[in-house]
Structures are given as structure tokens and as C-alpha cells.
Image (tube, rainbow, N blue to C red):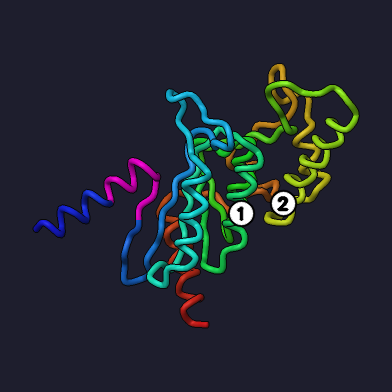
Amino acid sequence: MSDKNSENNKEKENIEDFGFVETKNPKGNIHCLTIIGQVEGHQILPPQNKTTKYEHVLPQLVAVEENPEIDGLLILLNTVGGDVEAGLAISEMIAGMSKPTVSLVLGGGHSIGVPLAVSSDYSFIAPTATMTVHPLRMSGTVIGVAQTFQYFERMQERICEFIVSNSHIKMEDFKKLMLTTDDMANDVGTILFAKRAVEMGIIDSMGGLSDALAKMYEMIGKDKNK
């Protein structure tokens, strides 16, 4: 009984502190990672903010890749965006994994949440979810010289290239969405509802949790039969 209680307490701690849970099933063992709120980078955000800390996520991804008992990774996304470099680091790690990966956008996958969503092998979006595509932003002190704007442009190209190479949207179509001026009040960019996100080729399919799990088990089955 004590072993069972210890196991339950460990699972509760993993969910509360690190936002992940592992499920075991005859069809395959899945590691479920949640990316919620704001992706936190090198700067610590205020305590009232819901955050996903990249220093917690990156070691998890290494553990998933190296653990022979885990067959696949399910990523649940409901994020407003956040630190660009931290978000790209997580996205690159997911994209570089050899095990099957499936993402599900719930609520929102905004800003840097877009590359996080497309980094998986297959992506879903809930019918009521939205995604916001907009140009790169930076807060704090900015040195007003040409090199700063060149850096912004290069960083933005990195994001665009990652999204285009990991989804089915064309570069010109994605940039058009990013630079639209009549879709958002007092801002530049586009709010994509689920159906349009799929039609534009950013997300693979609309669906919910059962659809994401079914796809995951299908991919795990194919992986095991290789």
C-alpha cells in the first residue's frame, strides 16, 4: 500500500511541479507534456503568471527520448506565447526526436506557440481553439540602430523557416498572415480559428484528445513494426 501511495504522490508532484504525466497502455506508453500560459525564458516572470519553464521541459524531452519504456510524446498546448529563443529551443528539441510525437492545441497556440504546435510529427487543433500569427516583438530597452532591426529580421526568418519546414504552409502565405493589418485591432497579424489553421496548412487536422491519442497509438504501432 505504501508503494502505491508513493507512486500516486510522485505522479501528483510531476503534474503540479512540471506539468507532465506518463500513461501505460497495452497499445503503448505515452509521456504527456503540457505547455501552458507563457513560455518562460531567461527572465523569471511574476508569480501570478501561469508559466512553462524551458529548463523543466528540455530535460524531460531528453528523458523521453532515452527512456526505452516510453513509446511516444503527446504535447498539450494552451499558450499565449512567450520567450522566442526558449520556445524555439523546445520546438527544435521536439522536432529532433526519433519517437512519435503528436501535438494538440487546446484554447490557444499563439505567437511562439505556433512553432511549438508544428514541431511534432502530427498536429491537431480543437475546434474552438485559435492561433495568433504576428511579427516578432521585443520588450525592454532597444538600441535604435540598423543592426537591431537586422537582428529582428534574422530572428523572424528563423521562426518562419521553422514553421514552414515543419508544416504544409508556403512561406509567402505565412508571411502574408503575419503582416496582415486589418485582422487584429491595433495590431499586425492574423487570428486563425481552427478550421482556417488547417486549411492554411499550419495544423494537420481538427480534433480532440481521442483523435490525438488514436493517431499516437497508430504511429507507435507503425514504429514497433519497423
Is 206 contained in the magenta span? no
Residue 166, picture quadrant: bottom right
User: CB of mark 2 within 8 Å of CB of mark 1?
Assistant: yes
Q: In which quadrant of the rendered image does the N terminus lie?
A: bottom left
- For the image, the number of numbered tags is 2
Q: Is residue 56 left or right of residue 117?
A: left
Above/below status of 152 relative to 183: below
Residue 11, given in percent of the width and then of the height, sits at 28, 51
Q: Residue furthest bottom?
A: 226
Residue 6, given in percent of the width and then of the height, sits at 18, 54
Q: Which mark is residue 162?
A: 2
- Which residue appears at 49% of the width and 38% of the height? 78
Give the labeled residue for mark 1: 119
- Which residue appears at 56% of the width and 68% of the height? 98
Above/below status of 149 relative to 58: above
Q: Is residue 149 left or right of residue 188?
A: right
- For the stretch drawn in magenta, what is the main secondary structure? helix
Tell which of 83 and 181 is nearer to you. Answer: 83
Q: Residue furthest right?
A: 146
Residue 147, picture quadrant: top right
Q: Residue furthest left?
A: 1
Give the extent of the magenta segment.
11-21
Q: Report the amino acid beneath label 1.
A: Ser
Above/below status of 219 relative to 165: below
Label 2 Cα neighbours within 10 Å, binned few <14 / some 14-19 / many ≥20: many
